Image: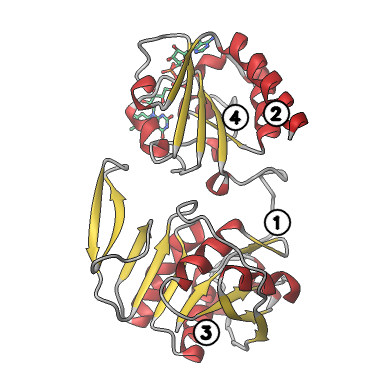
Amino acid sequence: MILAFVETAHGTLKKTALEVVQFASGLGEVTALALGSIPDTELAKLGQAGATKVLHIADEALNGMYSRAYTKAICAAAGQVHADVIVMSHSSTGKSVAPRVSVRMQCPLFAGVGALPENGSMRKTVFSGKAFADLAYQGGKAVISINPNSITPVLSDKAATVEPLACSFDDRDFDYTIKQTIDESGGHIPLPEAEIVVSGGRGMKGPENWGPIEELAQLLGAATACSRPVADVGWRPHHEHVGQTGITIKPNLYIAIGISGAIQHLAGVNQSKVIVVINKDPEAPFFKAADYGIVGDAFDVLPKLIEAAKKLKQSA
Ligand code: FAD
């Protein structure tokens, strides 16, 4: 049995939930585990990606992310269904919880893989996406965390059955107290989950010029991102900073506007499936990593892109 630990937010499944279940279904029969407040009707949707059953620990205390409590819950569910393999997302939650679970379950951790095991190994990128590591896996007990956006779920119309699971916690499982929660993404698409990202750099000259970036992002259903100096000087919030010292993303489409393409920036975005670069300097290093490049002034190119996106939307 495979246990797929799925993440939720504000009573709905995160996009990674379906990816995790779909990946797990490639390994065997899947039971999913969800924590916190979320309606059973929402959880039943996990059947579309291949889960036959969903275990739900509906304890409100689990609406916040507590790695000790989550570890206890995941291990309890794994014991309940005799799971050999536990799959979760390589999200900030997964990065915090997966190592704890692998220690508790006394089994290896395959962190940040991008595809199902093949020929006795699992592949992940290393050195900021510059090389692959093939990790030997001959089956058996394992914890696997998968990179967001590496799987495209193929959905059926099946529904999973949802069963409550009891799990008792004590004060030590909740190692800090959440006094206030702030939804920093303000209803926008969370950056690590976004399929399209529109990103701006110092070439945008100042925070007052971000309107067109936000407009383009909104038209394309994209998240916004930025280079590090842009976040450092406070033009954009830090949670938008991508790169070696920021978030690593892997969208289907990354549009970089007024960003030079320094190696530290590329480290966080070079696994994007398609990269479009807009820069007025034809020698900008980013063009070497781009699938499509526009040599031009962002302030001329952006309005044209917005017009084109509007037309595309109207005709769709
Ligand atoms: P710039 O390098 O100033 O480039 C601006 C670009 O905009 C230029 O290419 C210019 O031609 C173009 N431009 C200017 N005007 C226009 C216009 N009107 N239209 C179109 N194009 C225009 N950086 C990150 O982004 N992420 C990281 O995680 C990160 N980590 C780092 C870690 C370390 C240890 C170090 C030393 C650096 C790190 N950096 C990181 C910084 C990185 O080295 C670069 O300095 C940074 O990415 C440059 O940001 P930028 O491209 O926005 O600015």
Q: Residues within 10 Å of mark 3 (few under 14, many from 20)?
A: many
| Residue that label 3 marks | 77
Labels 3 and 4 touching (C-beta < 8 A): no
Counting residues from the start of the chain, the first of labels 2 and 3 encountered is 3
Position of 201 relative to 316 (above/below): above
Residue 35: image quadrant is bottom right
Q: Amino acid at mark 1?
A: Gln
What quarter of the picture does the N terminus occupy? bottom left
Q: CA distance from mark 2 to mark 1?
A: 41 Å
| Residue that label 2 marks | 312
Q: Secondary structure at mark 1?
A: loop
Labels 2 and 3 touching (C-beta < 8 A): no
Q: Amino acid at mark 3?
A: Ala
Please tell me how many numbered marks the rendered image carries.
Answer: 4
Q: Residues within 10 Å of mark 4 (few under 14, many from 20)?
A: many
Counting residues from the start of the chain, the first of labels 2 and 1 encountered is 1
Residue 129 in picture, x, y percent from top left: 31, 43
Left or right: 264, with 214 as reference point: left
Position of 72 relative to 254 (above/below): below
Q: Residue at x 62, y 69 (%)?
A: 48
Q: Amino acid at mark 2?
A: Leu
Left or right: 105, with 178 as reference point: left
Counting residues from the start of the chain, the first of labels 3 and 4 encountered is 3
| Residue that label 1 marks | 180
Residue 36 in picture, x, y percent from top left: 67, 73
What quarter of the picture does the C terminus occupy? top right
Counting residues from the start of the chain, the first of labels 1 and 4 encountered is 1
Q: Which of the two marks, 1 or 3, is nearer to us in this view?
A: 3
Q: For residue 236, which numbered disc appears in the image?
A: 4
